[in-house]
Amino acid sequence: MGIIVRNLGLVAYQPIHQAMQQYTDTRNADTPDELWVLQHSPIYTLGQAGKPEHLLDTGNIPVYQSDRGGQVTYHGPGQLIVYVLMDIKRANLGVKKLVNLLEQAIINYLSSLKINSSRRDKAPGVYVNNQKIAALGLRIRKSCSYHGLSLNVNMDLRPFAGINPCGYAGLGVTQLSELGIKLNLEQVTEQFLECLLELI
């Protein structure tokens, strides 16, 4: 069964979050897996166990309580988001294996751009020169995943200064444009999806 890829463009967070929950709640054994590819309007999201003390100065950017794993992060235009709506039991994947595959897809993609990146123990995501370039947060319900990953392409990084990214004080954040990559978001999306679909 192939994976359906939906390109949703620039969208608000809350309606997509509700749509992911609804998709997961109503799916059955025959429901295809989907990747939702999009950007979000500026928003801070707190994970299920997210601690408000990691919100330092959110200004006029809204804060939304989500049900994904992880702490606090920022989403905004110029950041590639891929939500992974998968029946992980059907795919013979555990949560750790799915996280590992998503991280590996990002690492492989960055490697194709001649960028060295790495994982960190107990801090899901992908890092370049000790700065975070990609974040991961998943929720598993009824053996199915939703939420997913974000990759910083060419965005305003200043809002990350208003939080402890992913709950780590002083954690630096970077993006492809700061690493000399001149690709636009559409090009990055196409290339990254190739790396991701090879693995899942």
Image (spheres, rainbow, N blue to C red):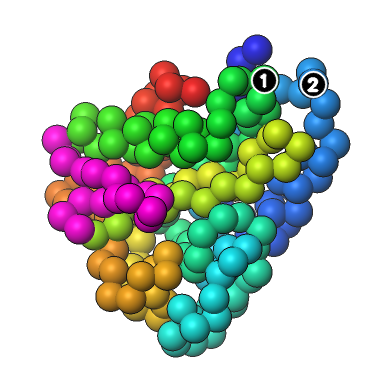
Q: Looking at the picture, does residue 107 appear above or below residue 125?
A: above
Other-residue count near label 2 (Cα within 10 Å), few / some / many at <14 / 14–19 / ≥20: few
Give the residues in magenta.
114-130
Residue drawn at point x = 53 percent, y = 45 percent: 148
Residue 90 marker:
1
In the rendered image, is residue 33 in sight?
no
Q: Percent from the top left, x then y, of residue 50?
A: 56, 70
Q: Indicate yes or no whether the magenta region holds residue 129.
A: yes
> CB of mark 1 within 8 Å of CB of mark 2?
yes
Quick one: SS at disc 1? loop
Q: Percent from the top left, x then y, of residue 20?
A: 71, 45
Q: Amino acid at mark 1?
A: Arg
Residue under label 2, please give it. 29
Q: Percent from the top left, x then y, of residue 21?
A: 75, 48
Q: Indicate yes or no whether the magenta region holds residue 147.
A: no
Q: Quadrant of the N terminus?
A: top right
> In which image quadrant can residue 43 be found?
bottom right
Q: Percent from the top left, x then y, of residue 192?
A: 37, 33
Residue drawn at point x = 52 percent, y = 51 percent: 137
> In which image quadrant can residue 140 be found?
top right
Q: Amino acid at mark 2?
A: Ala
Which residue is the extreme one toward the top? 1
Count up the numbered dots: 2
Other-residue count near label 1 (Cα within 10 Å), few / some / many at <14 / 14–19 / ≥20: few
152 sits to left or right of 174: right
